[in-house]
Amino acid sequence: MASYEFVTTWRVSAPIEKVWKEIYHTEYWPQWWKGVISVEELKKGDELGVGSIRLYTWETKLPYKLIFKIETLKVEPMKYLEGRSTGELDGKGIWTLYEEGNETIARYDWQVNTTKFWMNILAPLARPLFEWNHKVVMRWGAESLAKRLGVRVIQER
């Protein structure tokens, strides 16, 4: 398996409550995040969603789709959201949110291994292309969030 570590930071000119609501409620991502085809709940979690499992289908800039499950491991409302992915991407994702002045900083740390045979075979040559593709999908998220909230969002990385 090929391993990847990504860090994306969005600077959002909106209150943390609004940003949290959009990031936390992943079931609505297909309505606003370009590239998210579907989010299907497979298992309900507790009152915060811990233990829930959802199946995500993503369309990317490159001509392929990614399908993987994410189990919610930890939730600290307005601050922290952690999940473990399995399927075509195995690993861990963490959203961390905090405020700086009138802006919300949303940082996403994504550490994954690819499980698709063709991705692993091509990884030595295609790694820069896969990394670029991830940045494009996250830029779509930033742009889509800005449009949904009617605010300005800057993707820093």
Image: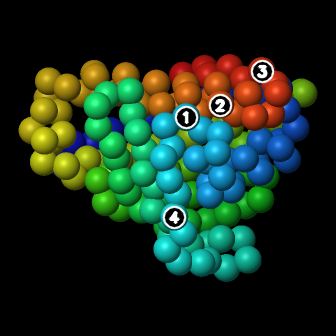
Three-letter amino acid code at the position of disc 4: Glu
Instruction: State whether residue 76 is above or below residue 140.
Output: below
Label 3 sits on a secondary structure element that is loop
- Mark 2 Cα-neighbour bin, 10 Å: few <14, some 14–19, many ≥20: some
Q: Please report whichever mark, 3 or 2, sits nearer to the chain's N-terminal start.
A: 2
Residue of label 4: 40
Q: Please report whichever mark, 4 or 1, sits nearer to the chain's N-terminal start.
A: 1
Instruction: Give the CA separation, mark 3 to mark 4.
Output: 29 Å
Residue of label 2: 144
Instruction: Give the CA separation, mark 1 to mark 2.
Output: 7 Å
Front position among marks 3 and 1? 1
- Residue in view at x 42 percent, y 51 percent: 57
Image quadrant in which you'd find residue 134: top left
Three-letter amino acid code at the position of disc 2: Ser
Q: State yes or no: discs 4 and 1 in contact (Cβ < 8 Å).
A: no
- Mark 3 Cα-neighbour bin, 10 Å: few <14, some 14–19, many ≥20: some
Label 4 sits on a secondary structure element that is strand
Instruction: Give the CA separation, mark 3 to mark 2.
Output: 10 Å
Residue of label 3: 152
Q: Give the position of the C terminus as an image quadrant.
A: top right
Q: State yes or no: discs 1 and 2 in contact (Cβ < 8 Å).
A: yes
Side of 102 relative to 113 (left or right): right
Instruction: Give the CA separation, mark 4 to mark 1.
Output: 17 Å
